[in-house]
Amino acid sequence: MSRELTLFEAVLALFLTLFYNSHGYFLPTGSVGIGFNGYFTLTNTTQHTHGQAFDNEPVSFTNSSTNLTTSFSINFIFAIVPEHNHQGSHGMAFVISPTRGLPGASSDQYLGIFNETTNGKSSNNVIAIELDIHKDQEFGDIDDNHVGININGMSSVISASAGYYDDEDGRFKNLSLISRNVMRLSIVYSQPDKQLNVTLFPAEISVPPRKPLLSLNQDLSPYLLEEMYLGFTASTGSVGAIHYMMGWFIDGESSYPRLEFGKQPNLPPYPKKASHKTRTILAICLTVSMLAAFVASWFGFVFYLRHKKVKEVLEEWEIQYGPHRFSYKELYNATKGFKEKQLLGKGGFGQVYKGNLPGSDAEIAVKRTSHDSRQGMREFLAEISTIGRLRHPNLVRLLGYCRHKEHLYLVYDYMPNGSLDKYLYRNSENQERLAWETRFNIIKNIASALLYLHQEWVQVIIHRDIKPANVLIDHEMNARLGDFGLAKMYDQGFDPQTSKVAGTFGYIAPELLRTGRATTSTDVYAFGLVMLEVVCGRRLIERRAVEKEEVLVDWILELWEKGEDILDAAEDNIREEQNRGQVELVLKLGVLCSHQGVSIRPAMSTVMQFLNGVSELPDNLLDVMRDEKLRGLPETSVEMLLGLNSSTITHSLVSNGR
Ligand SMILES: *[C@@H]1O[C@H](CO)[C@@H](O)[C@H](O)[C@H]1NC(C)=O
Ligand SMILES: *[C@@H]1O[C@H](CO)[C@@H](O)[C@H](O)[C@H]1NC(C)=O
Ligand SMILES: *[C@@H]1O[C@H](CO)[C@@H](O)[C@H](O)[C@H]1NC(C)=O
Ligand SMILES: *[C@@H]1O[C@H](CO)[C@@H](O)[C@H](O)[C@H]1NC(C)=O
Ligand SMILES: *[C@@H]1O[C@H](CO)[C@@H](O)[C@H](O)[C@H]1NC(C)=O
Ligand SMILES: *[C@@H]1O[C@H](CO)[C@@H](O)[C@H](O)[C@H]1NC(C)=O
């Protein structure tokens, strides 16, 4: 199975970054998991199960100035991998619901939307587009491969067999929903026309066919309450299917980018279960081998005492999706038995050891962390399988992992020059000081890694723990961001009342402390502080002779506001820098990014534009930052001040959500 990004995925990622409504955070319930290449799977191999993934933020379908329902257009990309090639399970649906999640929903024919009692109730206020792969007589289904529009119940108002009308010859082409092919569903509603069009087509077609599959003439405004949640659901019955939800986007008008998707990714087949016969044989083999094992264990016990036994439980999903899984023995040998001599460092999440993979001269860094809950571990590993696929020159590559007893081992590329903090907080006077070019390059490297995580990958990935100790320096003095997602592990089951917030003190954005919710903005906050540290070569808070210099960001802001030389805060060898403009830019940008107000912080794409000199910082930035009134107004962002096209900036779309 190829782990490389296919053209399809690259285009999908681009497509989604252009048009993503960008919340990117889902509330998953039930059987939702992460599957092939990090895509959401709404169901797993469990029978009679259902899953729901709901967007965390409500969407308003009402024009706030006129109070009238607005038109909308929603697209999503999906695929269904059935257990049996010619028999569907139950199917999936896109739902618009007044609640975030549909509690009490049933599996099987209810598709994870309704249950026996809620089905058909007019109080539901739920609109669903179903992709039904099972013919249920009960609900008057036309066949086992259809698309339907459902309002408040499982009986479709209107439905049609899956397929599309080819633009070229106008002929109807059948599609099989369970073909494992990636398809796109386009849902367009026009309030003036009171018409809902639904079009299904293969994802490699870049523009939706002109003639829709379903066209419903009905005023939907009675169902579209002020705030609605968008979600995806799926269910299985006695036959299984993996329902992939690969991406979705809201588009205000019905204009589409013309992009060729190219070759579809090859989705892995439905995981094989041992058949009845093989299970019987297996059982017999097991009994025999257990007897043998019983005898052998006497010998084994002696062996066990000599060599630490390696107990690893390999789960099906790990084989399927995981990045390389190392054996404990490999890592044990590579690090010479986790000897003290091999220890590179210790951090909040565990120890890091240097190692050499036997049989090659590849140098690796092995991070050992402990974990206690099995459930948290499973989710975390699912996340790792996503992280393992990220490829960017400024990210430390995750080579693989290993689970052994209560420890989790993560294997990374070894970075000979260690982490950035060593260069910044110099311990001895004669340690070399970084030249400005190197510092600026390091800042740009971190920015480009963050941009990739936030806006260029299919899913929004939040780093959660940006600080100099998590930035590693490679042999060419380029910076690479490491440890992404690790903080998440400590973030599971967050309870604002009792729980601690993951992250590192000093780099935690104020709203993260309040809400406990990490966002791309909280990453930008920490990155702003790191920029300041890189220029000034000191810690955020330090004992100083002069009191006003103790808190770095406050000091810089004060210099700036008083019109004094902002470069006074920079490290000695930078103060005389030729390229004053660049130093100043980074200092001001650092202050902007680490601003208390969420809405003022720029998105990483904007930060990159500043760093690359494509855009200039607005002149009135100080006024804007000072203006307390701006805080409550999420519409004001640096992007708007600059008049930047917001369609490329996922950030501002969050607040303008339609
Ligand atoms: C599928 O999801 C359900 C619900 O979360 C869970 O109980 C079950 O263990 C999962 N099954 C597999 C095979 O992962
Ligand atoms: C809301 O309605 C006003 C007045 O009809 C119109 O000018 C504006 O463009 C609408 N806004 C949206 C987001 O549709
Ligand atoms: C819009 O509707 C809400 C709730 O129905 C109402 O409180 C508000 O006054 C209305 N606004 C306008 C401009 O009609
Ligand atoms: C159906 O869902 C409703 C609403 O969540 C719940 O109150 C009810 O108990 C559920 N009924 C069944 C039969 O599951
Ligand atoms: C398309 O599907 C319909 C209904 O299942 C069937 O009658 C028709 O023969 C199919 N056409 C083609 C070209 O496969
Ligand atoms: C629905 O499709 C028909 C036929 O192509 C088209 O005339 C109409 O404008 C579409 N309506 C919407 C809301 O897109």
Image (cartoon, rainbow, N blue to C red):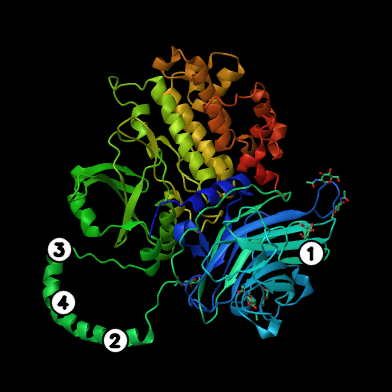
Q: Which residue is mark 3?
A: 307
- Give the secondary structure at mark 1: loop
Of callouts 1 and 4, which one flags the residue occurring earlier in the amino acid sequence?
Answer: 1
Of badges 1 and 4, nearer the viewer stands 1
Q: Which residue is mark 2?
A: 281
Where, by quadrant of the figure, is residue 80 drawn?
Answer: bottom right
**Rounded to the nearest whole Å, what is the CA distance between mark 3 and mark 4?**
14 Å
Q: Mark 2–mark 1 contact, CB under 8 Å?
A: no
Residue 585, x across and y down, in percent: 54, 22
Of badges 2 and 4, nearer the viewer stands 2
**Rounded to the nearest whole Å, what is the CA distance between mark 2 and mark 1?**
56 Å
What residue is shown at x 41% (from left), y 20% (from top)? 436
Left or right of 464 on screen, residue 19: right
**Rounded to the nearest whole Å, what is the CA distance between mark 1 and mark 4?**
66 Å
- Give the secondary structure at mark 4: helix
Of callouts 2 and 1, which one flags the residue occurring earlier in the amino acid sequence?
Answer: 1
Left or right of 532 on screen, residue 215: right
Q: Is residue 540 visible?
A: no
Quadrant housing the N terminus: bottom left
- Callout 4 environment at 10 Å: few (<14), some (14 to 19), or many (20+)? some
Q: Is residue 141 visible?
A: yes
Of callouts 3 and 1, which one flags the residue occurring earlier in the amino acid sequence?
Answer: 1
Task: Choose between 198 and 55: the one closer to the eye.
Answer: 198
- Callout 1 environment at 10 Å: few (<14), some (14 to 19), or many (20+)? many
Residue 285, x across and y down, in percent: 24, 84
**Rounded to the nearest whole Å, what is the CA distance between mark 3 and mark 1?**
66 Å
Quarter containing ligand 4?
A: bottom right
Q: Which residue is mark 4?
A: 297
Task: Choose between 519 and 459: the one closer to the eye.
Answer: 459
Q: Which residue is mark 1?
A: 223
Residue 528, x across and y down, in percent: 51, 32
Answer yes or no: disc 4 within 8 Å of ligand 1.
no
